[in-house]
Image (tube, helix red, strand yellow):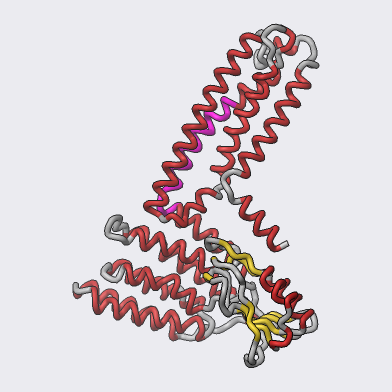
């Protein structure tokens, strides 16, 4: 089921699935319209909305509509390719996935393909030698679909023009990151049991090169329970692994059997690229890539970097509110079966701020916005694990300011912002009863 879900996600976010599905529906609909059209009551064709011409006129109309739709479809595909090229060069090639999985783009391409296939089916059924062989209703619907495509083309051009605006792309990527946060992180984290000390284990290599895209933890718990073992995962979604290595530790080593090795390898999905399915840092790094490209000398767009910093602070606030994924998983009897590596606060804060701070070290506006964002995160901080990486970021921002900011006024403003952020972070925030973790096994 895990692999089926992963495959379905890949198909659903591809550029071809929705157009192919809509095209198949259009073909079936065209066949239905042609078969049922000849049974229209007498006098219906006199209504002005229904096509009432002869077979030759119908063939000429269908031919003109079909030629026009093929031309418009070529135009839509060309415009889409231009936008994807611009996005890959300026925003980042890893963000192409965001444009491809857009439902509006898939739907527009599907509508154009569906109209072409519908017109083809209707066109080939019109017999120019028989006046009674004109599917009036089918021709009318084909004309209406082509008119609809004209208006959709205008809407699609407007949509594409807005889709390459940096602020809109930042909002789309940030919304996907927030969705992953809500899906992966528990709303009220429980208390994880303390895993036993690591003993001399047997090791399982994943036997594939690539990025870990998804891990079926339920399957690992079940396999460990059947074998009477504890599995320690040294690779998590987002990590790149080699076919040989020490990826999963099996304790005790005597429980490492061929069946267990097969089950462990089957629980990992490995591919050629990172995916956001279980990789929380993937969305963070997508936003960071936009910021670092915007701060490059060739673009030098500080305002995009500031927008990215604001979105990152909002996402980190949601992460701090929900807590971390459980690192210890138990079976139904409460016995520890899987100990896994999860993204911690140090890693997520570092992934969000490190590269932006390094790239924007010579830009006071970027450093000041980083300090302000850390100050805004103070109300979300609930423990030292969340506070420590933020204070470390403030220390590194201060060092970067000392080394790169030479104007006294800018340096003084940055020192004041860092001092204010530090003051807010060092004031402990009371934890309400609703935020207390639930007791777990």
Residue 352, by quadrant, is bottom left
Return the residue nearer the eye: 59 or 386: 59
354 on left or right of 414 = right
Question: Residue 410 at what x, y percent from top left?
Answer: 24, 72
- Residues 406 and 289: in front is 289
The residue shown at (65%, 19%) is: 123
Q: Position of residue 250 (x, y in %)?
A: 67, 83
Say above or below: 160 vs 66. Answer: below
In the depicted structure, whether residue 240 falls above or below residue 82? below
Q: Is residue 302 above or below residue 109?
A: below
Which corner quadrant holds the N terminus?
A: bottom right
Q: Residue 324 colored magenta? A: no
Q: What percent of the width, then of the height, locates residue 87?
A: 42, 50
Residue drawn at x 53%, y 30% as measured from the top left: 151
Q: Which residues are magenta?
A: 146-168
User: Which residue lies at the image location 59% right of the left edge and 51% below the top edge?
Assistant: 13
166 within the magenta span: yes
* Image location of residue 406, percent across then percent down: 19, 74
Q: Is residue 247 left or right of residue 418?
A: right
């Amino acid at each position: 089921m895990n692999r089926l879900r992963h495959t379905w996600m890949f198909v659903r976010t591809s550029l071809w699935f929705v157009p192919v599905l809509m095209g198949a529906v259009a073909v079936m609909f065209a066949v239905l319209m042609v078969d049922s059209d000849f049974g229209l009551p007498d006098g219906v064709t006199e209504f002005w909305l229904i096509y009432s011409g002869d077979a030759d006129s119908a063939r000429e109309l269908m031919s003109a509509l079909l030629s026009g739709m093929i031309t418009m479809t070529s135009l839509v595909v060309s415009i889409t390719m231009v936008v994807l090229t611009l996005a890959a060069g300026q925003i980042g090639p890893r963000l192409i996935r965001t444009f491809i999985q857009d439902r509006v783009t898939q739907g527009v391409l599907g509508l154009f393909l569906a109209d072409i296939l519908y017109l083809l089916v209707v066109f080939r059924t019109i017999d120019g030698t028989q006046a009674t062989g004109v599917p009036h209703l089918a021709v009318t619907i084909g004309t209406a679909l082509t008119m609809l495509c004209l208006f959709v083309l205008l809407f699609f051009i407007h949509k594409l023009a807005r889709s390459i605006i940096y602020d809109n792309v930042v909002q789309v990527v940030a919304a996907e990151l927030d969705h992953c946060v809500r899906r992966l992180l528990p709303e009220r984290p429980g208390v994880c049991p303390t895993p036993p000390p690591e003993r001399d284990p047997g090791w399982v290599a994943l036997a594939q090169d690539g990025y870990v895209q998804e891990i079926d933890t339920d399957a690992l718990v079940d396999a460990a329970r059947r074998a009477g073992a504890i599995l320690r995962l040294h690779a998590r979604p987002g990590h790149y692994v080699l076919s040989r290595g020490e990826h999963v530790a099996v304790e005790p080593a005597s429980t490492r059997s061929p069946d267990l090795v097969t089950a462990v390898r089957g629980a990992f999905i490995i591919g050629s690229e990172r995916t956001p399915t279980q990789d929380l840092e993937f969305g963070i790094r997508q936003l960071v890539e936009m910021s670092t490209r915007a701060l490059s000398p060739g673009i030098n767009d500080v305002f995009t970097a500031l927008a990215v910093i604001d979105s990152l602070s909002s996402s980190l606030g949601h992460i701090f509110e929900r807590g971390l994924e459980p690192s210890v998983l138990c079976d139904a009897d409460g016995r520890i079966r899987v100990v896994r590596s999860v993204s911690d606060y140090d890693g997520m804060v570092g992934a969000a701020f490190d590269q932006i701070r390094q790239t924007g070290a010579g830009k006071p506006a970027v450093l000041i916005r980083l300090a302000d964002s850390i100050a805004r995160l103070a109300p979300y901080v609930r423990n030292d694990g969340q506070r420590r990486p933020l204070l470390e970021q403030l220390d590194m921002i201060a060092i970067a300011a000392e080394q790169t900011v030479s104007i006294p006024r800018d340096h003084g403003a940055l020192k004041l912002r860092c001092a204010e952020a530090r003051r807010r972070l060092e004031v402990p925030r009371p934890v309400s009863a609703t935020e207390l973790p639930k007791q777990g096994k």
